[in-house]
Amino acid sequence: MAPWTEVPLWAPDIPEVVGTWTASSAKALATGLRCRPVAETVADTWRVLSEGGYPRPKYLQGKIPVGLDKDKHDAVLAAWSQA
């Protein structure tokens, strides 16, 4: 799996991406950034995806497809529902 492809916001611990997660949100918060609760964001995302099925076309980062392959996506959900 390549960074930023199958799993959003995932990057390996390698020198090329050092500092990726060290950015501060202090300035944005000071100027009024409002962060929604995670549960609200997840519920809204699930609603949108549920209403439209699996999103197509695949999103691209340059020429690299971003997101899980549909079969892998379905397998992950099936395994999770068994847990």
Image: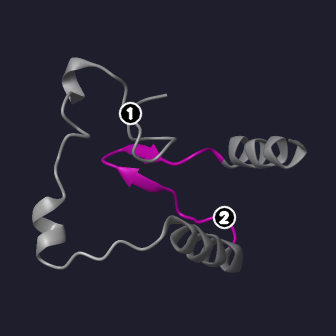
Q: Quadrant of the C terminus?
A: top right
Q: Which residue is mark 1?
A: 3
**Is 63 situated above or below 51?**
above
Task: Please give the name of the residue rendered at 62% of the width and 73% of the height, measured from the top-left corner.
Answer: 43
Judging from the image, the colouring scheme is one colour
Q: Give the residue type that dot 2 points to.
A: Tyr
Q: For this view, does 64 lie left or right of residue 54? A: left
Q: Nearer the viewer, residue 83 or 64?
A: 83
Q: Which residue lies under the disc numbered 2?
A: 54
Q: CB under 8 Å between callouts 2 and 1?
A: no
Horizontal side of 77 relative to 39 (left or right) equals right
Image point (57%, 65%), residue name: 56
Mark 2 or mark 1: whose residue is earlier in sequence: 1
Q: Amino acid at mark 1?
A: Pro
Residue visible at 18% across and 79% down? 32
Mark on residue 50?
none
Residue 23 horizontal/vertical position (percent): 17, 47
Q: Residue at the location (42% across, 30% down)?
A: 2
Where disc 2 sits, the SS reads: loop
Residue 30 in the image: above or below residue 60:
below
Residue 55 position in % (x across, y down):
59, 66
Q: Is residue 67 magenta?
A: yes
Q: Horizontal and vertical percent for residue 66?
A: 46, 48
Stretch of the chain drawn in magenta: 53-69
Q: Position of residue 47 (x, y in %)?
A: 65, 77
SS at mark 1? Answer: loop
Instruction: Tell me if residue 50 is in the magenta stretch.
Output: no
Q: CA distance from mark 2 to mark 1?
A: 22 Å
Q: Main secondary structure of the magenta part?
A: loop
Q: Is residue 59 left or right of residue 11?
A: right
